[in-house]
Amino acid sequence: MTHWIILPIVLPAMLAPFIVLAARYHIGIQRVFSVTGVLALIAIAAGLAWEVSDGSVILYQLSDWAAPFGIVVVGDRLSTLMVLLTTILALAVLLYAIGSGWDNRGRHFHALFQFQLMGILGAFLTGDLFNLFVFFEVLLIASYGLMIHSGGAPRLRAGVQYVLFNLIGSTLFLFALGSLYAETGTLNMADLSQRVALIGAEETVGIRVAAVLLLLVFAIKAALVPLHFWLPSSYAEAPAPVAALFAIMTKVGAYAIIRVYTMIFPPGLEATAGLHDLWLLPAALVSLAIGMVGVLAAQTLDRLVAYSIIGSMGMVLVSIALFSPEAIAASLYYIVHSTLAGAALFLISDLVRTGRGNLELTAQPVMAGTHMTAAFYFAGAIAMAGLPPLSGFLGKLLVLDAAYGTELMAWIWAVVLISSLISIVGFARAGSVLFWKAHGLESAVADDQQSLPTVLSYTATGGLIALLALHTIFAGQVHGYTSKIAAQLFSPDTYVSTVLETPGKLSDAKEEDH
């Protein structure tokens, strides 16, 4: 049993109260500890990802209580990939918040930021459904505090709407957990995978109810239509660095769907037959279409980016709903891409707000720092719209290839291609209004009389754009790794035997993997 796997949860959990108690009035000290903590998390996440890259599974038993009776933290290829992605994103967001001064516009930003990381990383690493609920609540509380950071009536209204909608999801989550526990007597995911498989076809009513409720809960987190209403206002009204961090939060819902519906309710399970293709796939296609139509219809840049997040989640869930190894591999590649692209666009929108004063998509005088901001917007828009040469284009090709030969291939291809065209028009329209038409206005104000974004703000945003470029350059290697993740998900013997500490074919699994 290794202790390293618990550190991504314990470290931010210790840093947050330390910042509140020892440095609440010293923003400089808060920044130092917060950045140092995130750098340590990146190093730990990279080490964990390297350790499980051979197909092994890391287990930590709290208080040395064995599963399924004790609380376990589990690291495999999927969970460590998501942890590494989250920590890298957190560094860029944190640097932007510091450079732009957002962290000093309200109280307790850095403490809430650490609690938010604790909730997200814990959700990725837990091996127990009840503790998944606990970490959902931790990130919900922290995200509400971050959302209303620096105050304002619109931000408060959006925050209340966000909390109420997610509290409904939390209630459904508890109902689902109660149903599962009543039917199986356990909430450990590895143990559930074995017990659910033993339930006869005539006794699956409770299991089916739990599976549907869980899917609804995770769909709320993933902003799947028609459960997406909370996202546009919440993300648009949140401070830009907070909205950029929230780009990973919808992926928590996608991660939970992948984990639960490959391990506990796999596609071949009779109790949940039809749940994926009859409900999840149509909803994902509608989400993709609505998201991109929202991009075209948006009147402000922050709303445009928020709807692009809904559209990108639709693309992710279309691939997940196919529930084949190829489709899951494609969805994981696209998850990395859409997280980086969405976060970059939220930061770019704040660069526009800084240099322009507002985010209205109307022709106005040239903004401060227009050349650098326009270059970043051009790259981010290309990535999110799925144009070559960036990773969005490759991700969509992988999704289309995974859908090839399926019964609904025509529908999937049509929706993906048409929505891509709509998003291109929407992003092009916004870019032309923000940057091109501004040069034709004689009342333009000189750059030195405007608020110019800081160097650190540009550096953090440029770092995300650079990561998108690397994600494209190393697409073959990344997709190869996501393919290994998908293979491990559909053959969870190593995970189950490690968690339950039963004799398993661990060496055989590694040999087959190689």
Image (cartoon, rainbow, N blue to C red):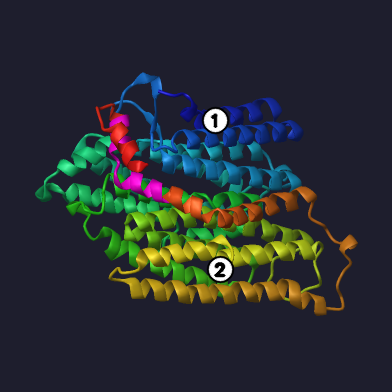
Q: Camera-side residue: 171 or 330?
A: 330
In magenta, the rendered stretch is: 483-498
* Secondary structure, magenta segment, majority class: helix
Q: What element carries label 2?
A: helix
Q: Label 2 sits on what residue type?
A: Ala
Q: Mark 1 points at which residue?
A: 13
Residue 175: image location, x then y, percent: 29, 45
Q: Label 1 sits on what residue type?
A: Ala
In the picture, measured across the screen, residue 464 lies left or right of residue 264, that is right
Q: Nearer the viewer, mark 2 or mark 1?
A: 2
Q: Please state, as top left, top right, bottom left or bottom right, where the N terminus lies in the image.
A: top left
Q: Earlier in the sequence, mark 2 or mark 1?
A: 1
User: Is there any visible trace of residue 187 in the rendered image?
Assistant: no
Q: Is mark 1 on a helix, strand or loop?
A: helix
Answer few, some or many: residues within 10 Å of disc 1's Cα (few below 14, many 20 plus, some between 14 and 19): some
Q: How far apart are marks 2 and 1 (CA)?
A: 37 Å
Answer few, some or many: residues within 10 Å of disc 2's Cα (few below 14, many 20 plus, some between 14 and 19): many
The stretch drawn in magenta includes residue 490: yes
Q: Which residue is drawn at 31% across and 23% down?
A: 66
Q: Name the residue under label 2.
A: 385
